[in-house]
Image (cartoon, helix red, strand yellow):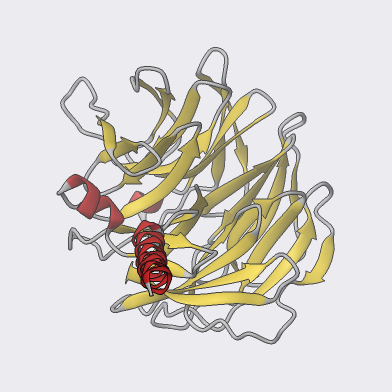
Amino acid sequence: MKKNLLFRVAFAALIALSAISCQKQENNTPEPKASGYYVLNNGSFKMNNSSVTIYDSESKVSTANAFSSTNGKNLGDTAQDILISGDDIFIAVNVSKLIFVTDKDLNIKHEITATLEDGTTLSPRYLAQGPEGTVYVTYYEGYVGKISTSDYTVSTIPVGPSPEGCAYAGGKVFTSNSGGANYPAYDKTISVVNASSFKEEKRIEVNINPATMAAFGDKVYLFSIGDYGATPAKVQSISATTLEVKDLACTSPTAIAVSGNILYVMCGGYAADYTPLPATIYKYNAADGSLIGEFVTDGTALPNAYSLSATDDFVWVGCSDYKNNGDVYAFTKDGKLYDKFDSQGINPIKVAAR
């Protein structure tokens, strides 16, 4: 009887310990934490609704308004570009006229503003990684800036009118001078800046209204918008060594991105009301600019394609109707759709890998 009682007590204790153990295991199981990729939402012009969404590609869970929830303040008006440089994230917010520097958890470390001697505060557009310790940025008022990643100071020099994209290759900084502020008198030059002296050395002629850039080795790929009429959009390559400009074979391009040794070109064009038409993405050999073929292999349609990004593991297409939250399509490098998710913001303009 006594042995039976002891057995029952021991068995009950074992069950209780097991329950406690299971309960502890359940409580200690970490909740899914968004990580992996940052989705920058451009927002609507003058609406102060730019945002960053964090997307976890393993759980396929996204976290909206990650920047504002982390810092207790909005990102600002018309975010234009995001760049990961070492342990820092640089976010250029065009209309707010500042660049945020954050850590990988989006905690603000520094805010960068560039002001001329006459008191003009400059509007940042696109960012580019330079040599170690340097990030470059274009300013729409006609300047390029060099940011030190050690103390976040910025120095500027004048370049061509209304520069958009920038890239670093072969010891040179390239800026695409769109002339957009002088519409309809668009510009068609690229400023070539010596990175060592940080002085403009030359301007070379390209297609009208040059926009975004992507560097690969000693080449810079350039997407130019054209004049929305007689002069069509183009993709061109620029040799950082000889400054020779060559056209790529493509029709109605709208965006470019480079990852690994592949140049991705999104084509489709725009309707009369500037709504993006259904897009097709092509792959090119980034080394020589030769066409490989279509990228998407599973028949996925891309309506309202707005932006194109490429990271080590995925190619990302942001889709937008300019009014509601956009969609982001994540494709594996073999052209198959991995996931489609709500960008949790308006106009998803870029995806960057954490």
- At 33% across and 70% down in the image, what residue appears? 344
| Up/down of 307 relative to 140, above or below | below
Q: Which of the two residues, 262 or 34, is positioned nearer the viewer here?
A: 34
Q: Is residue 228 visible?
A: yes
| Residue at position x 54%, y 64% in the image | 58
Q: Quadrant of residue 293?
A: bottom right
Q: Residue furthest top?
A: 197
Q: Position of residue 339 (x, y in %)?
A: 55, 75
Residue 105 is left or right of residue 333, and the answer is: left
Position of residue 148 relative to residue 141, above or below, is: above
Q: Residue at x 35, y 44 (%)?
A: 105
Q: Nearer the viewer, residue 12 or 76?
A: 12
Can residue 207 be seen here? no
- Residue situated in front as seen by the camera: 8 or 110: 8
Q: Position of residue 159 (x, y in %)?
A: 45, 31
Relative to residue 242, is residue 59 drawn left or right?
Answer: left
Give left or right: position of 286 versus 126: right
Quarter of the rendering occupied by the N terminus: bottom left
Position above or below: 45 against 246: below
Instruction: Return the x and y of residue 68 as percentages of the image width and height.
Output: 21, 53
346 sits to left or right of 216: left
Q: Nearer the viewer, residue 120 or 23?
A: 23
How many marks overall? 0
What is the x, y in percent for residue 354?
50, 47
Q: Say if 323 sits above or below 49 in the image.
A: below
